Image (cartoon, coloured by chain):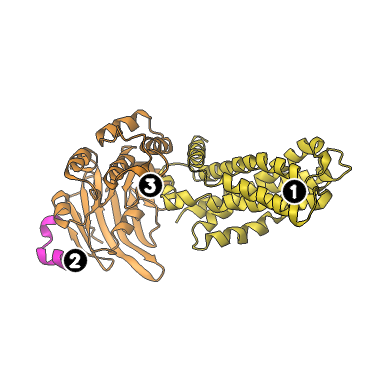
Chain colours: A yellow, B orange
């Protein structure tokens, strides 16, 4: 854990100093909501349509971070430095997934109010705790799968294409569960309690992907 | 198979190569390299650009796998037992392995955490390489020579027993060369494998020479056995 903490700390310092990832994610999400606001000529969406717009926008913003996650390691030798150290390889997985999770949460601090302002139904406030719970589980899935895919893509020449090509199919179950879980929370008659079925699907998918990534990550970073 | 060595080894060799072969795609970069390096010895690896010198160093650093033959470091076979020896090897390669947007100190502290080295060692090394005053500047703002001094500090941070040095004095002026000598020179007292664009300087430091030509060992043995024609032929 100490190694993972060292890598995570370094990644957060680099992001704070360069502002290369999170501002781009936030800008993309806000601009997309603005585009939907005017393109659909609607002040608010509700139910599954609102959930779909919200989830897909977050997904595309997250892909920006996935594509950049290992760039500094590849371009500035961070991978080699890490591989030279007598440390457990999965520390890199834990650190990068944690960084991606933090980036997603910061993104949502900006994206949720922007969505509420531009597209959300009026009563979103009382659904907020349930929405946060679903987003947390979705973020974990994005973080684990995103890190895994990014580690594969970074070793290829077409990394900007490979990330989405591999990542989107792997993320599909999480996307469906997130959108279907958020849908009822954004309906005009929302009760404010999260749909248990989709929470369970997300939690199970998180666990499954975390185990798979843990088992396979070593093979991705070694020669 | 008899394995050539410059001196009679009494201990298990630090580096043992037996028929090491490595390919990149269809190209064979190293072919059947066999030698021993014992503790405290310096092996100079000579050869023109693309001869396989850096590849050999990366294999010894456990960053690349050998495709054929056996490689042992400190008696441990690679790549299977690479995890046992990583903390005992220091690599100074072509890339500094430093983050450009972190300061010199932040980079060294990060590497110290990876290697479980006490933070005090960072200040000690910054002083040794003469980088204390520029330690808080981002690496991207430093000159090549300064980056090289930091890179040397990074490579020796964990006091490795085997130093892999790829053109270690490139970008260093004579004063900086003197500063880093206790860390990477013979005075460091560790086993070294080094490459250099200056074969005469490398030979002066070496106990053992591996001359590479077309991925094969054109010569393995003590520097005194390498005649000038063979040396010229390497770079022709």
Mark 1 element type: helix
Q: Are marks 1 and 2 in contact (CB under 8 Å)?
A: no
C-alpha span from label 2 to label 3: 30 Å
Count neighbours of disc 1 (C-alpha within 10 A) and say few if under 14, some if 14 to 19, many if 20 or more. many
Mark 2 element type: helix
Count neighbours of disc 3 (C-alpha within 10 A) and say few if under 14, some if 14 to 19, many if 20 or more. many
Q: Is residue B7 left or right of residue A68?
A: left
Chain name for mark 2: B
Q: On the image, numbered disc 3 is attached to which residue?
A: B97
Q: In the rendered image, is residue A182 in sight?
A: yes
Please name whichever residue, B34 or A88, is drawn nearer the observer in this view of the structure.
A88
Count neighbours of disc 2 (C-alpha within 10 A) and say few if under 14, some if 14 to 19, many if 20 or more. some
Q: Where does the image place residue A203, in percent across and percent down from the top left?
A: 72, 44
Indicate the quadrant where residue B163 lies: top left
Q: Is residue B103 left or right of residue A34?
A: left
Q: In which quadrant is the N terminus of chain B drawn?
A: bottom left
Q: On the image, numbered disc 1 is attached to which residue?
A: A178
Q: Which residues are magenta?
A: B222-236
Most distant residue in the bottom direction: B26
C-alpha span from label 1 to label 2: 63 Å
Mark 3 element type: loop
Q: On the image, numbered disc 2 is attached to which residue?
A: B234
Indicate the quadrant where residue B214 lies: bottom left
Chain name for mark 1: A
Most distant residue in the right direction: A189
Please name whichever residue, B136 or A146, is drawn nearer the observer in this view of the structure.
B136
């Amino acid at each position: 854990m100490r190694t993972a903490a060292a890598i995570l700390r370094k990644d957060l310092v680099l992001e704070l100093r360069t502002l290369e990832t999170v501002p781009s994610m936030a800008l993309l999400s806000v601009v997309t909501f603005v585009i939907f606001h005017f393109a659909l000529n609607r002040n608010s969406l509700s139910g599954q349509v609102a959930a779909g717009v919200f989830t897909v926008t977050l997904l595309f913003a997250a892909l920006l971070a996935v594509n950049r996650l290992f760039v500094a390691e590849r371009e500035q030798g961070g991978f080699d430095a890490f591989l030279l150290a007598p440390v457990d390889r999965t520390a890199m997985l834990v650190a990068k997934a944690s960084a991606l999770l933090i980036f997603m949460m910061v993104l949502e601090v900006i994206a949720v109010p922007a969505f509420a302002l531009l597209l959300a139904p009026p009563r979103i406030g009382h659904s907020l705790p349930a929405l946060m719970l679903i987003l947390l589980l979705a973020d974990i899935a994005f973080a684990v799968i995103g890190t895994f895919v990014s580690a594969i893509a970074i070793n290829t020449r077409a990394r900007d294409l490979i990330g989405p090509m591999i990542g989107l199919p792997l993320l599909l179950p999480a996307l469906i569960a997130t959108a279907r879980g958020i849908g009822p929370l954004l309906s005009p008659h929302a009760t404010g309690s999260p749909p248990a079925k989709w929470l369970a699907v997300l939690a199970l998918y998180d666990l499954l992907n975390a185990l798979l990534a843990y088992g396979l990550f070593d093979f991705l970073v070694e020669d | 198979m008899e394995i050539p060595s410059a001196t009679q080894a009494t201990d298990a060799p630090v580096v043992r190569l037996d028929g090491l072969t490595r390919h990149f795609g269809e190209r064979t970069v190293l072919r059947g390299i066999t030698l021993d390096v014992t503790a405290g010895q310096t092996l100079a690896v000579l050869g023109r650009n693309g001869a396989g010198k850096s590849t050999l160093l990366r294999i010894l650093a456990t960053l690349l796998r050998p495709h054929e033959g056996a490689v042992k470091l400190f008696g441990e076979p690679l790549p299977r037992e690479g995890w046992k020896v990583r903390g005992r090897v220091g690599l100074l390669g072509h890339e500094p392995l430093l983050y450009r947007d972190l300061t010199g100190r932040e980079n060294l502290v990060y590497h110290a955490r990876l290697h479980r080295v006490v933070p005090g060692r960072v200040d000690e090394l910054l002083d040794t390489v003469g980088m204390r005053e520029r330690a808080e500047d981002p690496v991207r703002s430093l000159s090549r020579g300064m980056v090289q001094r930091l890179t040397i500090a990074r490579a020796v941070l964990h006091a490795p027993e085997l130093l892999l040095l790829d053109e270690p004095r490139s970008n260093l002026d004579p004063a900086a060369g003197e500063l880093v000598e206790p860390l990477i020179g013979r005075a460091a007292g560790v086993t070294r494998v080094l490459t250099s664009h200056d074969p005469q300087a490398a030979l002066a430091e070496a106990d053992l020479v591996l001359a590479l030509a077309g991925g094969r060992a054109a010569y393995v043995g003590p520097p005194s056995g390498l005649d000038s024609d063979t040396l010229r032929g390497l770079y022709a």
